[in-house]
Image: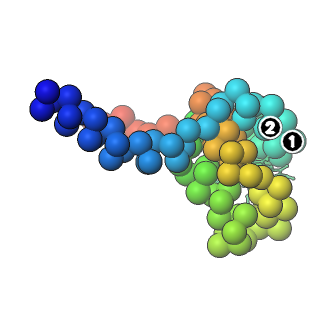
Amino acid sequence: MIKRNFAVALLAAFAPFASVSAGDAAAGESKAAVCAACHGANGVSTDVNNPILAGQYASYLEFALQSYRNGSRQNAIMSGFASQLSDDDIADLAAWFSSQQGPLQTAERP
Ligand code: HEC
């Protein structure tokens, strides 16, 4: 009983954070069609001017898109695109691109 109460309390404590990145990758895929022109199919850009999004952390992608949208990160191209996105769009797009296989990786520990 004590254990169960503890689990419930733990869930209640973390649920608000869990919902932050609860994007829908499938919905993100269709929303990402407009991004492919620059960021490549599935977020693997082949143009050095356009960052690779595939395999990036969802939380980073969300933060970047929110920053373009609120103006704390300035870029003429991305500000325009981000201003069209809702919070759900941002979460979905972040879920989609982060779920794609990309060349970004963390070095293995020796
Ligand atoms: C016309 C070309 C173009 C299109 C279309 C475009 N982007 Fe970008 N995107 C860029 C460029 C250029 C940058 C780098 C801007 C900078 O230096 O901050 C960028 C940066 C980003 C970043 C930050 C990446 C990082 O590593 O910090 C994200 C996230 C992003 N774009 C997502 C999107 C999404 C999602 C879409 C579709 C809704 C999209 N972009 C459409 C050109 C584009």
Tell me the distance, in whole angstroms, between the alpha carbons under discs 2 and 1. Answer: 7 Å
Q: Secondary structure at mark 2?
A: helix
Residue 45 in view: yes
Ligand 1 within 8 A of label 2's CB? yes
x 20%, y 28%: residue: 4
Nearer mark to the viewer, of 2 and 1: 2
Above/below status of 49 relative to 29 = below
x 64%, y 32%: residue: 24
Q: Secondary structure at mark 1?
A: helix
Pointer 1 residue: 34
Image x and y of residue 46, in percent: 76, 40
Image x and y of residue 91, in percent: 64, 44
Ligand 1 within 8 A of label 1's CB? yes
User: Seen in the image, is 13 located left or right of residue 106?
Assistant: left
Q: Residue at the left extreme?
A: 2
Q: Residues within 10 Å of mark 1 (few under 14, many from 20)?
A: few
- Closer to the camera in the image, 69 or 14: 14
Quadrant holding the C terminus: top left
Mark 1: amino acid? Val
Image x and y of residue 105, in percent: 50, 37
Mark 2: amino acid? Lys
Q: Residues within 10 Å of mark 2 (few under 14, many from 20)?
A: some
x 86%, y 42%: residue: 34
| Tag 2–tag 1 contact (CB < 8 Å) | yes
Above/below status of 95 relative to 70 = above
Pointer 2 residue: 31
